[in-house]
Image (cartoon, helix red, strand yellow):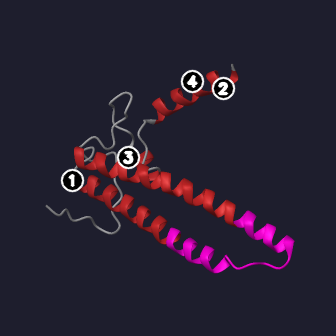
């Protein structure tokens, strides 16, 4: 069942939470984000292959290796982000998307729009960060 979502649609707190239109909005947003990351990754691979030439100057070679290392770390972060996007898409399919993993309460639509892979409400996230800080400071 395809759901129509207007181009200028923005989810709001005034409508039923995670209705069909909201779910479709977030599905499209997540898929577009994932497509952008994958396109960027392909462009990076092409650039890295073109850059893999030998530099006669040792400083140029060192600079190139540093750039390559930074780029590969960024790609690794994006690979992990894609896994989170895929998990969010799976939650849309199973009906658990938009609900806090700790409390079961709805995550605000504003938070989901800003961070569509969020799994915790703002309150649960803040509590989690406080606990993390306490353990880190010990």
Question: Residue 132 versus residue 126: which sits nearer the camera?
Answer: 132
Q: Which residue is mark 4?
A: 131
Q: Is residue 110 above or below residue 43?
A: above
- Residue stretch in magenta: 41-67
Q: Secondary structure at mark 1?
A: helix
- Image quadrant where residue 21 sits: bottom left
Residue receiving disc 2:
136
Q: Nearer the viewer, mark 2 or mark 3?
A: 2
Q: Position of residue 95 (x, y in %)?
A: 24, 43
Neighbor class of circle 3 (other Cα within 10 Å; few <14, some 14-19, many 20+) is some
| Residue at image mark 1 | 20
Pinpoint residue 53: horizontal percent, then vertical percent: 70, 79
Residue 107, quarter of the rendered image: top left
Q: Is residue 38 visible?
A: yes
Q: Is residue 73 left or right of residue 2?
A: right
CA distance separating discs 1 and 3:
14 Å
Are dots 2 and 3 in contact, CB under 8 Å? no
Label 3, on which residue? 109
Total marks drawn? 4
- The span from disc 2 to disc 3 (Cα, nearest Å) is 31 Å
- Element class at badge 2: helix
Q: Quadrant of the N terminus?
A: bottom left
């Amino acid at each position: 069942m395809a759901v129509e979502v207007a181009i200028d649609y923005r989810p709001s707190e005034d409508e039923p939470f995670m209705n069909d239109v909201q779910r479709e909005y977030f599905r499209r947003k997540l898929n577009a984000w994932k497509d952008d990351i994958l396109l960027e990754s392909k462009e990076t691979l092409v650039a890295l292959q073109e850059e893999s030439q030998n530099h006669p100057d040792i400083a140029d070679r060192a600079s190139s290796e540093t750039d390559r290392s930074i780029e590969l770390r960024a790609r690794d972060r994006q690979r992990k982000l894609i896994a989170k996007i895929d998990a969010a898409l799976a939650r849309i399919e199973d009906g658990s998307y938009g609900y806090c993993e700790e409390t079961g309460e709805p995550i605000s639509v504003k938070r989901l729009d800003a961070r569509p892979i969020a799994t915790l409400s703002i309150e649960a996230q803040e509590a989690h960060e406080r606990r993390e800080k306490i353990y880190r400071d010990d």
